[in-house]
Image: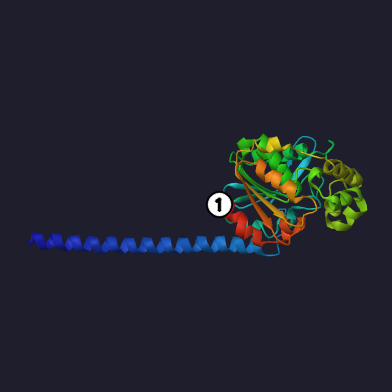
Amino acid sequence: MNLPYLFRKIYHEMVTIRNFIYSKALSILIILSIVVTLILLATNLKLMSQDIQFGFSERNGRYLNTGDAKIYYEVYGQGQPVVLLHGGYGYIDGFKQYIPVLSKEFKVIAIASRGYGKSEIGNTTYSYELLANDVKKIIENEGNDKAIVMGTSDGAMIAYILASKYPNIVSSVVAMGGPLGTSGYDKEGLDWLRNLNSEEFKAYRPDLLKIMPQPERYADFVENLKIMWSTPNILQFDDLRKIECPVLLLFGDRDLFCTMDHITQIYKSIPGGQLAIIPNSTHSDVSFRNTTILKRYILQFIRK
């Protein structure tokens, strides 16, 4: 018997079998990769579709009792949390162009402030500190990771409080159109606040009135807002100097609620602050309408 020949033949057979197994395994991995990609693509397409009504989603909606009120919020995606905080007259659906983009990379937590939409009003007189405490409890309830807090107007003011007083739960802040209070308003902004009434608010978002847990308390809700919105300063500039995390400040050059002098003082007071003034933009433009801001400024900032 020619043993060397037999060994060579066995060896070649084993190599052939090994190569066959490797090729099959590679084919299976490629197929699995394609399947996973298709699933993720389908998920993102669904999120991008109009079928999902942000702020009204039973599938993604959650509640947390923060003491005297149940606060409604929605969660999308996975990863580091990005907390979205709307402003006055706003709601979760104001971020409808942001959520699909952000949820591809982050865990988006979009919160409805007290009295807005599905969130209860509670029995405590409103203050920005109270709303910040609601947000703090939701962040802690959703895990141990530090959150990127992104707020517009009132939401930006809440973000300042969270970053200055609770640095252990905030990794960075994106503040859009956020003054420190009425001390930053110009004359038109102050006139708007003085003339605010519940009927005007109803006309602006009648759909939110329909889903309020206690619509009979609507007047109480608006009165609470007027009290909170009349606060001259929610923080002092010295409080902003305590903020340790990076902060991206975005303001429009035509904002009635933030004079340029006030904006400059906020920027100079935050050690890790970055400032972008958006030309030809109002208070609302910076918050929601100018989606270029998301791609040009926000994503680059929060990916660092």
Q: Is residue 68 above or below residue 276?
A: above
Residue 155 visible, this angle: no
Taking the image as shown, residue 156 lies to the left or right of residue 32, namely: right
Q: Is residue 30 above or below residue 190?
A: below
Taking the image as shown, residue 28 lies to the left or right of residue 286, namely: left
Residue 95 visible, this angle: yes
Q: Position of residue 115 (x, y in %)?
A: 82, 45
Residue 183, picture quadrant: top right
Residue shown at the point (91%, 46%) measured from the top left: 219
Within-10-Å neighbours for mark 1: few <14, some 14–19, many 20+: few
Closer to the camera, 70 or 94?
A: 94
Mark 1 lies on residue? 303
Residue shown at the point (71%, 53%) measured from the top left: 251
Taking the image as shown, residue 238 lies to the left or right of residue 222, namely: left
Residue 161, picture quadrant: top right
Label 1: element kind:
loop
Residue shown at the point (20%, 63%) measured from the top left: 12
Closer to the camera, 105 or 2?
A: 105
Q: Position of residue 260 (x, y in %)?
A: 74, 51
Closer to the camera, 139 or 257?
A: 257
Q: Quadrant of the N terminus?
A: bottom left
Q: Amino acid at mark 1?
A: Arg
Q: Position of residue 268 (x, y in %)?
A: 66, 43
Most extreme residue toward the front is: 261
Q: Position of residue 109 (x, y in %)?
A: 66, 48
Q: Is residue 235 above or below residue 89?
A: above
